[in-house]
């Protein structure tokens, strides 16, 4: 059984409130002998287009004393997931879910925004108190 991040259920609730249907919990990624588990898979059907937008969400808390160490691990994990998804589920977009406080305290720093832009990280910022999605960043 996978170990869930502190805000796993919070992000799940936030996605549901935002109109998403959880399709996988966890989302299994298998590719060339590797077996990885992202936190959530979700889909949202747009009535006007009659097409579903599909995503995979990896929830991150950044709760360790070293933000830099946690960022290194998270970016590496994100890049690995995105590479494998390109081959196994290319219709899905990958998002890194962050609490609003982490986004505001760290991800607004110029060096971090350069990393996000350079590696084209997609972010989902959520409010852990209200269990709502605050913003999507692509």
Image (cartoon, helix red, strand yellow):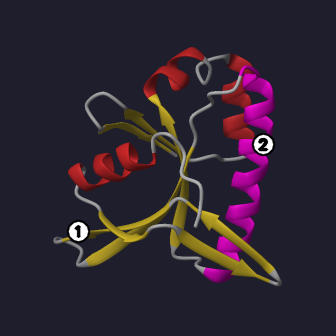
Q: In 3D space, how far apart are the residues under numbered discs 2 and 1 (Cα atoms)?
A: 34 Å
Position of residue 113 in the picture relative to residue 32 (left or right): left
Disc marking residue 46:
1
**Residue designated by label 2:** 73
Question: Which of the 4 image quarters holds residue 54?
Answer: bottom left
66 drawn magenta? yes
102 drawn magenta? no
Position of residue 11 in the picture relative to residue 92 (left or right): left
Vertical position of residue 110 compared to residue 42: above or below = above
Q: How many marks?
A: 2
Mark closer to the chain start, 2 or 1? 1
Give residue 31's position: percent from left, percent from top.
Answer: 75, 81
> Residue drawn 58% across and 19% down?
108
Secondary element under disc 2, as helix, strand or loop, is helix
Q: Residues within 10 Å of mark 1 (few under 14, many from 20)?
A: few
Q: Which sits in the foreground, 131 or 136?
A: 131
Give residue 114's position: percent from left, percent from top.
Answer: 72, 30
Q: Nearer the viewer, mark 2 or mark 1?
A: 2
Which region of the structure is painted magenta? 65-88
Vertical position of residue 27 compared to residue 50: above or below = above
Outermost residue on the left side: it is 47
Disc marking residue 121:
none
Secondary element under disc 1, as helix, strand or loop, is strand
């Amino acid at each position: 059984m996978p170990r869930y991040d502190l805000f796993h259920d919070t992000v799940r609730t936030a996605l549901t409130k935002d109109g998403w249907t959880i399709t996988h919990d966890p989302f299994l990624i298998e590719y060339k002998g590797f077996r990885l588990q992202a936190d959530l898979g979700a889909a949202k059907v747009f009535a006007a287009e009659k097409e579903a937008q599909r995503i995979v969400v990896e929830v991150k808390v950044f709760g360790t004393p070293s933000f830099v160490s946690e960022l290194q691990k998270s970016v590496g994990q994100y890049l690995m997931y995105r590479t494998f998804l390109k081959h196994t589920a290319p219709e899905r977009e990958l998002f890194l879910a962050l609490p609003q406080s982490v986004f505001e305290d760290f991800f607004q720093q110029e060096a971090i925004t350069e990393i996000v832009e350079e590696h084209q990280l997609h972010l989902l910022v959520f409010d852990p108190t209200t269990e709502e999605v605050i913003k999507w960043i692509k």
